[in-house]
Amino acid sequence: MTALMLHLALLLAMPPLLLGIITRTKAWFAGRKGPPLWQPYLDLWKLLHKGAVYSRTTTWIFRAGPIVTLAAVLTAGLLTPLGAAAAPFGFSGDVILFAYLLALGRFFTMAAALDTGSSFEGMGASREAAFSALAEPALFLALAIVCIPAGSVSFAEAWASPWQTWGPAHPALPAAAVTLFAVLLAENSRIPVDDPTTHLELTMIHEVMVLDHGGPDFAFVLYGSAIKLFLFASLLVHMVFPIPPAGGALGATVFVAGAAAVAVLVGIVESVTARIRLLRVPQLLVGASVIAALGLAVILYRGIP
Amino acid sequence: MTGYADLLLLAVLVLDLYVVYTSRLAGCVRASALQGAALALLPVVHYLESPSADLVHVLVMAASALALKAIVIPHLLMRALRDANVRRDVEPFVSLHLSVLLAGVLIGLSFWLATVLALPASGHTHLFVPTAFATFLIGFLVLVSRRKAITQVIGYLLIENGAYVFGQSLAAQMPFVVELGLLLDLLVGVIVMGIVILQINREFDHMDVDQLNLLKG
């Protein structure tokens, strides 16, 4: 019961903090002080108290978009372990359900964007569809690297600490981690792929799709994307940090520190790299897939440990 | 100390991929320099894991590889790049996406080759053989798919690096002299090619090898 409460607390409370950490890291790199770490919580609070305006051309799809997206990522969050213990739900195949719940959320974001009838938002939706189609094989190849040695497509077994079964120097581990990080950047529209802060037309992918959402809807969108970032960070933390299965308080501490470290890393990447050209994004994702395929080849070559 | 040699070999493979991924000539040269440094570390790490060869042999090999592959040759190439004063992007015949995909296919092929060939190397525990094949094949890919003379030098370097990795898997059996001969060959090759690049460039204001077949006597 306490494990469940801890899981829910982490899942519901921590995601906006990651956004705060990223902003703070970027501010530090730019020599500014930056907003406080809890600023995203204040933003969400403010947005939730605003009214919403709906265009007459929109239908129920536009209103359903943010709600379904948030629900999908929250459900996905119930499937993945968050350091403390096994996830509330775990069964064979939950890895696949996790990936496609995120895809469902993305689908509804894109449908809501198309529903506004704005060609501008349609462009964003088209980009999002193209890039996420390329990110999907990378994600699955990276997950296959942990699932194949465990002989299971369930997070609970695959994530039972790859470090202990492989040792820290197994070459497939960094390959999977690098790929997951690239997918994290692409899926969460962070800088080398998309700029989450800009509202310049030609550079946007994710932001352009949610331009017409306001008030509580926009709060759901922001919260949903924070949770999505948090979930990808949790995958990365479980892959890179040695968290014992059913780690309890210690596992949760390592997990929180690891997730914060991932956020700092994202902030550093955002500060030191420029956004790559739109045409080069597929190349980044194909490169990430090839690296994961390389890790997979290493596993198959050396035999399953 | 187990598995660190494989980590280095993975880094070598990723640098192979970076060479076909990047669109900048300087990036290619830097990647090959880094790969040289990784390859110089390789005999040392391999020795620490399984001391089979002679330590002096290992140290001399590491030092000569570091000096040549990581410092001298990249330096020469960078100078050629600066002096030739050409456009600094790669200009491949096949697109960069496709190059990366092809490189991935070649890596898969070399893992498969390594499992089916009967080799005296140390079983399937190490990645020496597949890395050697992959580096070799990607070297060929760079040779045939890039337009500029300098990228052909880099393809040639990759091929030599593949031969070096393969030599490492046979470190005990491979005579030292062979390895040194290879390194010397490489250095001479790079110097000659550097001069050729400069000459082509001075003569024709470009170093596009695709246009060389238009020359008729």
Image (tube, coloured by chain):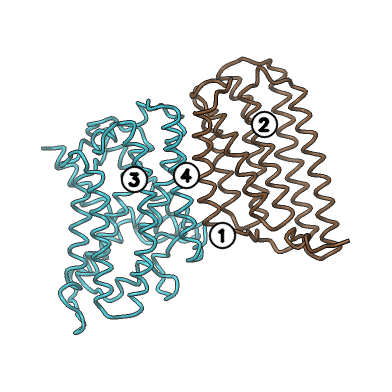
Q: Looking at the picture, tell me which residue is in the foreground, B93 or B15.
A: B93
Task: Indicate which disc residue A259 carries.
Answer: 3
Q: Earlier in the sequence, mark 3 or mark 4?
A: 3
Q: Secondary structure at mark 1?
A: loop
Q: Mark 2 belongs to which amino acid?
A: Tyr
Residue that extends furthest to the right in the rendered view of this protein? B217
In the figure, the shade used to draw chain B is brown
Q: Mark 3 belongs to which amino acid?
A: Ala
Q: Looking at the picture, tell me which residue is in the foreground, A125 or A26.
A: A125
Q: Is residue B170 above or below residue B110?
A: above
User: Are labels 2 and 1 assigned to the same chain?
Assistant: yes
Label 3 lies in what chain?
A: A
How far apart marks 3 and 4 lie (CA) works out to 23 Å
Label 2 lies in what chain?
A: B
Task: Indicate which disc residue B95 carries.
Answer: 1
Q: Secondary structure at mark 3?
A: helix
**Is residue B75 found left or right of B130 in the rendered image?**
right
Q: Mark 4 belongs to which amino acid?
A: Ile
Which of labels 2 and 3 is toward the front? 2
In the figure, the shade used to draw chain A is cyan
Q: Secondary structure at mark 2?
A: helix
Look at 74% across and 21% down and name the residue there. Answer: B176
Label 4 lies in what chain?
A: A
User: Are labels 2 and 4 assigned to the same chain?
Assistant: no
- How many marks can you see? 4
Label 1 lies in what chain?
A: B
**Is residue A246 found left or right of A266 in the rendered image?**
left
How far apart marks 2 and 1 lie (CA) works out to 29 Å
Task: Indicate which disc residue A291 carries.
Answer: 4
